[in-house]
């Protein structure tokens, strides 16, 4: 749509998008001021998002009324960030997105807004833009509201489990004995989720695995189903900090897998210390700091609400080869919420009785999962991301429709599966699999030239974090990262208050000196 500026008597031009005026034809600034003054936000509002505000006349008024809030404008048209439209005026906002920025709007918002409860985010619409841009406006609004729902869900989870997750970090640092250092590769990888459709694709995965033509990166929840189909994954991923998630890993560990990949805050059984582990950082300064202090290599991955999203992004980081995603239904089929066998079904079976039959409990669980709305949030996120992913990503089997509509599809039973990896066998070393593309680091051992001896202990990592909280250069950043995790109820906790909580939570794993400081 063609936009054009039209002068007004007030000295501030209006703009037309086609035949629709986006601002007053007489005094756009006064119009914006009156509109903003009708809006009431919480005193502690931290982010204000404007949906296509046109010339940005609302920004100065918002700044005056909400001086502590970060103002973000989202444009439908690149016209509004050009010099012709007075781009300096719209850029008075703290952050500005337009299609020409080259990244999806949700990824842009991820960069600008941390996981925070929706009550701290204000969404401001400019209705003349809806009239002018119609469907494009609604798509931008929908993508933004999906983002807000997702960060709100993440923030509430962090608020409830933050301290437990933090304790997991230092428990895990004491646990890790072997860590993996990723080496660039070109092997094809299948990423397996635990959705019901995984059962249909297991025969094809097994066939290609037996030919050493495919590496398997498996969500921990999918391992029992893979094992039942005769498949041992090359790498198992776990990102959940809840204690129940360890049930998936306990079953997986009985299969003697080659390696694990875990987030620092994952809930891990003690047996994990016997396996080589690829460590994932959430990209925060405090996590990168403690890992570097121990000389542990890691892959930085932004936290996602579902392990399959993390697994997919990890696969993209590990290989330049083809990637096949399967078992990502993001829905259930009748009573089947996951591929069978599934670790948690064991708990339902043990608790069943004639008053609480297994199938009735399964029905209740399926309904609860559907009612949560999380599947829809994740599907919307994938829909945004998939358009920006490399073309070497393919969907295998009956994944969620968002995958099958945006990616090349390989249906079960088609002989074409693997047509994109004809030379895979030649590219993979004898023995096959992802594990050959890592160098092992074994703490305190010099068994091989491929093994690196780490320089420092978990105690050193705790000391490094405490020192950073006393460093004026690091303290504000780390305080901002750790506060929602450890002191969610406090408005502006000090670094000193955080140091006290850090010692209290991590201290039990260390010496008395570190506990008490």
Image: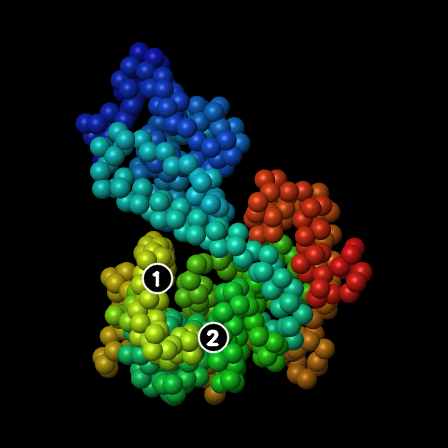
- Circle nearer the N terminus (1, 2): 2
Q: Which residue is mark 1?
A: 368
Could you say where residue 346 lies in the image, as x and y percent from the top left?
A: 42, 78
Viewer-nearest residue: 148 or 490:
490
Could you say where residue 150 lies in the image, as x and y percent from the top left?
A: 41, 51
Label 1: how many Cα within 10 Å (few below 14, some 14–19, many 20+): few
Viewer-nearest residue: 242 or 237:
242
Which residue does the image show at 43% across and 43% down from the upper left?
118
Which residue does the image show at 22% across and 79% down from the upper left?
414
Tell me the number on the disc at residue 424: none
Q: CA distance from mark 1 to mark 2?
A: 20 Å
Q: Farthest left residue?
A: 19
Which residue does the image show at 71% across and 45% down from the upper left?
496
Q: Which residue is mark 2?
A: 248
Give above or below for 489 relative to 447. Answer: above
* Res. 324 image quadrant: bottom left
Could you say where residue 317 lies in the image, as x and y percent from the top left?
A: 47, 65
Viewer-nearest residue: 270 or 441:
270
* Res. 426 image quadrant: bottom left
Q: Is residue 318 visible in this depiction of the protein?
A: yes
Horizontal side of residue 161 vs 401, given as left or right: right
What kind of element bears circle 2? helix
Q: Quadrant of the C terminus?
A: bottom right
Which colouring convention does the figure follow?
rainbow
Give above or below for 226 relative to 18. Answer: below
Q: Quadrant of the N terminus?
A: top left
């Amino acid at each position: 749509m063609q936009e054009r500026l039209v002068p007004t008597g007030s000295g501030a031009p209006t703009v037309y998008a086609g035949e629709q005026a986006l601002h007053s034809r007489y005094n756009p600034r006064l119009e914006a001021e009156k509109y903003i003054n009708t809006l009431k936000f919480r005193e502690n509002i931290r982010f204000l998002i404007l949906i296509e505000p046109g010339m940005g006349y609302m920004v100065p008024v918002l700044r005056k009324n909400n001086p502590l809030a970060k103002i973000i404008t989202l444009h439908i048209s690149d016209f509004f960030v050009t010099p012709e439209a007075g781009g300096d005026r719209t850029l008075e906002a703290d952050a500005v997105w337009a299609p020409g920025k080259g990244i999806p709007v949700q990824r842009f918002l991820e960069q600008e807004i941390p996981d925070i409860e929706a009550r701290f985010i204000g969404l401001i619409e400019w209705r003349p833009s809806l009239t002018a841009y119609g469907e494009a406006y609604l798509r931008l609004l929908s993508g933004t509201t999906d983002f807000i729902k997702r960060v709100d869900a993440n923030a509430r989870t962090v608020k409830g489990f933050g301290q437990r997750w933090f304790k997991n970090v230092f428990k895990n640092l004491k646990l890790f004995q072997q860590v993996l250092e990723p080496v660039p590769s070109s092997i094809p990888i299948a990423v397996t989720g635990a959705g019901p459709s995984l059962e249909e694709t297991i025969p094809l995965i097994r066939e290609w695995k037996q030919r050493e033509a495919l590496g398997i990166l498996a969500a921990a929840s999918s391992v029992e189903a893979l094992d039942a189909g005769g498949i041992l994954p090359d790498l198992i991923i776990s990102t959940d900090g809840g204690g129940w998630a360890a049930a998936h890993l306990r079953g997986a560990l009985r299969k003697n897998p080659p390696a694990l990949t875990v987030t620092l805050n994952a809930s891990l059984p003690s047996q994990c210390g016997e396996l080589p582990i690829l460590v994932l950082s959430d990209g925060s300064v405090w996590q990168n700091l403690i890992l570097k202090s121990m000389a542990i290599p890691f892959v930085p991955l932004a936290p996602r609400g579902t392990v399959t999203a993390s697994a997919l992004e990890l696969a993209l980081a590990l290989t330049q080869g083809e990637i096949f995603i399967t078992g990502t239904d993001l829905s259930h089929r009748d009573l089947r919420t996951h591929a069978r066998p599934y670790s948690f079904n064991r708990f339902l079976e043990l608790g069943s009785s004639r008053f609480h039959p297994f199938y009735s409990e399964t029905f209740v669980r399926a309904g609860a999962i559907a009612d949560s709305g999380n599947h829809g949030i994740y599907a919307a996120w994938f829909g945004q991301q998939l358009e920006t992913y490399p073309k070497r990503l393919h969907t295998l089997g009956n994944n969620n429709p968002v995958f099958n509509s945006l990616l090349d599809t390989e249906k079960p039973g088609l002989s074409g599966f693997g047509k994109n990896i004809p030379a895979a066998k030649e590219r993979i070393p004898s023995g096959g699999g992802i594990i050959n593309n890592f160098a092992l680091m074994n703490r305190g051992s010099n068994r091989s030239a491929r093994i690196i001896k780490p320089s420092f202990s978990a105690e050193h990592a705790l000391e490094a974090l405490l020192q950073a909280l006393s460093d004026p250069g690091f303290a504000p950043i780390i305080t901002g990262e750790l506060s929602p995790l450890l002191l969610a109820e406090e408005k502006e906790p000090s670094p000193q208050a955080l140091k006290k909580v850090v010692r209290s939570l991590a201290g039990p794993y260390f010496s008395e000196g570190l506990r008490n400081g």
